[in-house]
Amino acid sequence: MPARGLCKVSAITPTTRWTLARMTREEIRAVVDGWTGEFEELSGLDWIEYVQIFENRGAMMGASNPIRTDRSGPPVFCPTSPAAETKAQCEHLALTGSCLLCEYLARGEDR
């Protein structure tokens, strides 16, 4: 079916050799703050139901440019897998009164 969407691209580092794993905590914070701003802006558009932000690593992602970038590409509808995950998380919250991802985080901190 036809779909309308939007894709925004930004470089997260000035060089291709850096990844999030090689950045300082402060540099990562700036990247995450940028992602948060993009998410808030895009999710504020009434015709967008889903925002996906991901790191593009050039050829690994099928792109010819090796620059590390992040992309936010909201389609008009929520894709199947994220929709199913959201539904499961909502059902868990309704059943238990607890956030499923918060439970995962807490379990990881216990180890």
Image (tube, rainbow, N blue to C red):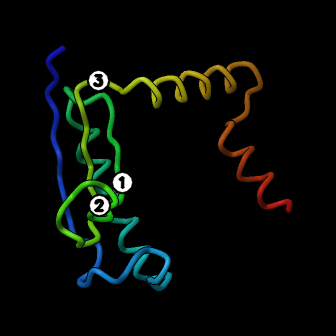
Which residue bears the numbered disc 2? 70
Q: Quadrant of residue 96?
A: top right
Give, as a three-letter code, the residue at label 3: Phe
Mark 3 to mark 2 CA distance (whole Å): 21 Å
SS state under label 2 = strand
* Residue 1: % across, % down: 19, 14
Give, as a three-letter code, the residue at label 1: Phe
Mark 1 to mark 3 CA distance (whole Å): 17 Å
> How many numbered discs sit on the rendered protein?
3
Marks 2 and 1: CB-CB under 8 Å? yes
Mark 2 to mark 1 CA distance (whole Å): 5 Å
Above/below status of 54 relative to 88: below
Marks 3 and 2: CB-CB under 8 Å? no
* Residue 55: % across, % down: 35, 60
Which mark is first along the chain, 3 or 1?
A: 1
Which mark is first along the chain, 2 or 3?
A: 2
Which residue bears the numbered disc 1? 54
Instruction: Tell whether 29 sits left or right of 96.
Output: left
Which residue bears the numbered disc 3? 77
